[in-house]
Image (cartoon, helix red, strand yellow):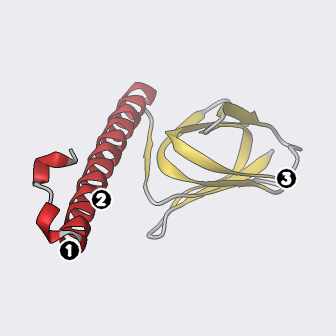
């Protein structure tokens, strides 16, 4: 058996000493951890962490990224964690969070590009005022 702890900056979400397996997901995909696993450190994806207790019970926790460390036991540190008993509901939450994260990333990338174009336009306007570009000339 091994100890599993899941913590956020605000709270200890889970602390179980009777865990016999853990399933998690990082950028390379899903993986499993059993007692005796080699020391390991990875950055978690937005995903559902699952584990099995020695008596067969299963636990689930949706995590918004974070770090997982294996060192005798399994410790997870994450900004956001949502424990639950219904795997389907947690998976739906994770899918929604992934979608929202991608939308935010696209929006931020678009704003950064707009700022870059505006900066170039203004620099060109200062360097060559006779040839100042209009806003639509670069985009």
> Which is more N-terminal, label 3 or label 1?
3
Image check: 65 left or right of 104?
right
Q: Nearer the viewer, mark 2 or mark 1?
A: 1
Instruction: Report the quarter where the C terminus lies.
Output: top left
Q: Nearer the viewer, residue 134 or 67?
A: 134
The residue lying at 50 percent from left, 43 percent from top is 61
Q: Which residue is mark 2?
A: 116
As helix, strand or loop, the secondary structure at mark 2 comes to: helix
- Alpha carbon separation for disc pair 2 and 3: 44 Å
Tag nearer the camera, 2 or 3: 2
How far apart in space, not on screen, are marks 2 and 1 (Cα)? 16 Å
User: Which of 120/103 is in front?
Assistant: 120
The residue carrying mark 3 is 39
Q: Which residue is mark 1?
A: 126
Q: Residue at x 47, y 67 (%)?
A: 11
Left or right of 69 on screen, residue 99: left
Residue 92 vertical placement versus 120 (above, below): above
Percent across and percent down for residue 49 are: 57, 40
Q: Residue at x 14, y 70 (%)?
A: 129
Residue 109 pos. (x, y %): 33, 49
x, y (%) of residue 117? 25, 56
């Amino acid at each position: 058996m091994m100890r599993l702890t899941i913590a956020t900056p605000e709270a200890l979400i889970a602390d179980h000493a009777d865990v016999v397996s853990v399933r998690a997901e990082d950028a390379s995909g899903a993986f499993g951890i059993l007692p005796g696993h080699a020391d390991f450190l990875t950055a978690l994806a937005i995903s559902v962490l699952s584990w099995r207790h020695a008596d067969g019970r299963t636990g689930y926790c949706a995590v918004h990224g974070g770090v997982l460390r294996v060192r005798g036991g399994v410790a997870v540190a994450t900004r956001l964690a949502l424990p639950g008993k219904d795997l389907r509901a947690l998976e739906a939450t994770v899918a929604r969070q992934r979608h929202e994260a991608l939308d935010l990333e696209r929006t931020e990338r678009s704003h950064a590009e707009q700022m870059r174009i505006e900066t170039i336009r203004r620099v060109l306007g200062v360097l060559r005022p006779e040839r100042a570009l209009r806003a639509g000339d670069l985009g």
